[in-house]
Image (spheres, rainbow, N blue to C red):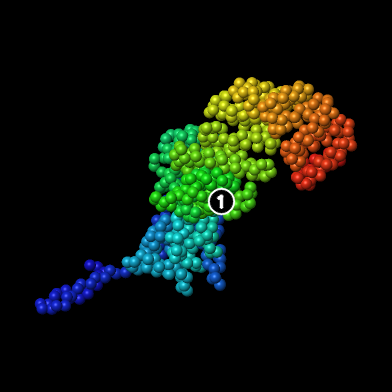
Amino acid sequence: MAGDSYAGPTAKQDGDHNTQHNHFHSAPPARAAWPHQVGVLPPRAGCFQDRAEAARLQQMLAGGGTTVVGPARPVLPGGVLAGLGGVGKTQLAADYVRTTWSAGELDVLVWVTAGTRTAVVALYAQAATEVLGIAVEDPDEAAARFLAWLEPKPEPRPCRWLVVLDGIADPVDLGGLWPPASPHGRTLATTRRRDAALFTPGRQRIEVGEFTPAEATDYLNTALATDERTEPPADIAALAQDLGCLPLALSQAAAYMIDAGTSCAAYRTLLADRAQSLARLSPEVLPDGQSRTMAAAWSLSVEYADRLRPAGLARPMLQLASYLDPNGIPADVLTCSPALSYLAAHRTPTSPGAAQEQKVSADDAHGALRALHRLSLLHAPARTGEPGDSSAAVRVHQMVQRATRDMLTPSRHEQAAHAAADSLTAAWPDPERDTDLIQALRACTTALTACVETALHQPDAHSVLFRAGNSLGTSGQVAAAIAHFQQLAGTTRHHLGPDHPDTLTARYNLARWRGEAGDVAGAAAATADLLADRERVQGPDHPDTLATRSSLADWRGEAGDAAGAAAAFADLLEHMVRVLGPDHPETLTARNNLASWRGHAGDAAGAAAAFADLLADRVRVLGPDHPDTLTTRSNLAHWRGEAGDVAGAAAATADLLELTVRVLGPDHPDTLTTRSSLAS
């Protein structure tokens, strides 16, 4: 046998009790000549796109760019491509390898599919055999010898090596297996993880995101051109946006359209249909050697995140986040009481038969967000700031959201949707001072409604739908508020029926904002129609019916009929005293409105007298510091002045100023308005 050595005689002598054995030793494997590659690079994607990240990677790992680790040890920097699964990290790494290899800058290339520690050790052992020419039965020993060989040494011709660790699933697997820092070798890793252990001063991170819109549209055009197809540019751009410019989603959508003969517009219709799952919108044969569909692309990452502390909360947290605005979810929404209740109720058991912990704290919720962040499933801020801090926004890719929702049963789907709506309501501040926060809450409500319109109307229309519309109006976006309540009136009528209280309330708000927009006559007519329906459905004494009568009286006054408004409020006041009682807050409000319209109708003295009586009752019922009491003082001062009692108006305004400074503070808008009135 060629290469074997003969170990001695083979014959056994008669009577000889010592046995002779044959020994055959394999010759050491030959050392591979340089340049040499160990491991298999993934094939280049069919429609590979040049990206800005590729240039950054080339610059970071350029031969001339050194860093220093330890005293006077210049080394080539290592790099880690980190990001969500499906953004193309492996393709970027392979492109860098091919470019560097073609330029003759490498002597030894080792490409490791680094999903497990066993896989890394096995590939290192293979490299030891091929590059060092050694045959060691123990893979761990062989791997250790290969890593020792990579350590920089004074040599006449040092080896220029590159080790690529592709797809690190768990940083623990790389313990003791990272190649050493070297002035001649480089290490490049790809991973979905963001754990601190992966990044050191000698290991720089490049966050890999989605394609830019231009890259995404170019990809789709190029991919469809392989089937000799062209699509309208507007449809291409819209589909790229629908898919969040995610390379994985774009490639599978293009393959599906080619296989099914479907246009971009038709695919967008399928994608918008919430009854269609992502699994049904994926091609039967995946492109570019991909192993997972969009529906399953992130399932392993979710499993890893769910094991991180606090165990079992990452999955339900991602479910909750999957219903809200992908571009920014206020962290308070995901850590408030309704969110914590959902996390506790749906915590993933840490082991079969294990009892779920019923209590989840806000710190636990923050921990779940950071666990998802570590797996690149979303972006969570390192510090969430104080409650209401609008900078503490959570971002999650829309395709991750879609895949997460697809995994839920219909029952869980409704539970998660209602938990998200309850969380938005709980996190909504009053008054609305932080405009960025309020805008984010409205965007989250819009995203939630797009996902689960039906669920938000079962059993009734959720209060967040009304809160979002009124928030638009109070922020000055009156036209948007009108459009919102036109839509809401239609959906409540469709889901709940024309006589449902929520349908009537949507009509009430629609009329209100039409009036605020200047269409006072239209608001009055719509409110009159609504009043007739409320009296028929809810009865004349129902609080909503009384509120509608009050609104109708106000719109009549705003339309120019101040005397008619005063008469309507006089009739309404009698009704409210009988139904609600003389000291009910709504009764006191009706007295306020009656006095005001009496003044506008020309009876300034009567208005002043009515406000004086009302002030005494509001102080008695609500207290001297209540906002309604302060408003009554302001109105009393105003109508005293209108009645000719300028000195009395000034004295009343001075008293009011002292109260507003004490109760509201010197810089409150109402305080400043009172100062202006006193000066006048």
The answer to whether residue 414 is seen in the rendering is yes
Q: Residues within 10 Å of mark 1 (few under 14, many from 20)?
A: some
Quarter holding the C terminus is top right
Return the residue nearer the eye: 234 or 567.
567
**Residue sitting at 50 percent across and 47 percent down?**
343
Q: Judge left or right: residue 172 versus residue 611.
A: left
Is 55 located above or below residue 676 in the figure?
below
Residue sitting farthest toward the left: 14
Q: Position of residue 73 (x, y in %)?
A: 54, 71
Q: Position of residue 519 (x, y in %)?
A: 71, 26
Name which residue type carries label 1.
Ala
The residue wearing badge 1 is 362
**Residue sitting at 52 percent across and 33 percent down?**
458
**Residue sitting at 36 percent across and 65 percent down?**
139
Q: Position of residue 246 (x, y in %)?
A: 51, 45
Return the residue nearer the eye: 37 or 181.
181
Q: Position of residue 229 (x, y in %)?
A: 47, 36
Quarter holding the N terminus is bottom left
**Badge count:** 1
Q: Judge left or right: residue 636 versus residue 622.
A: right
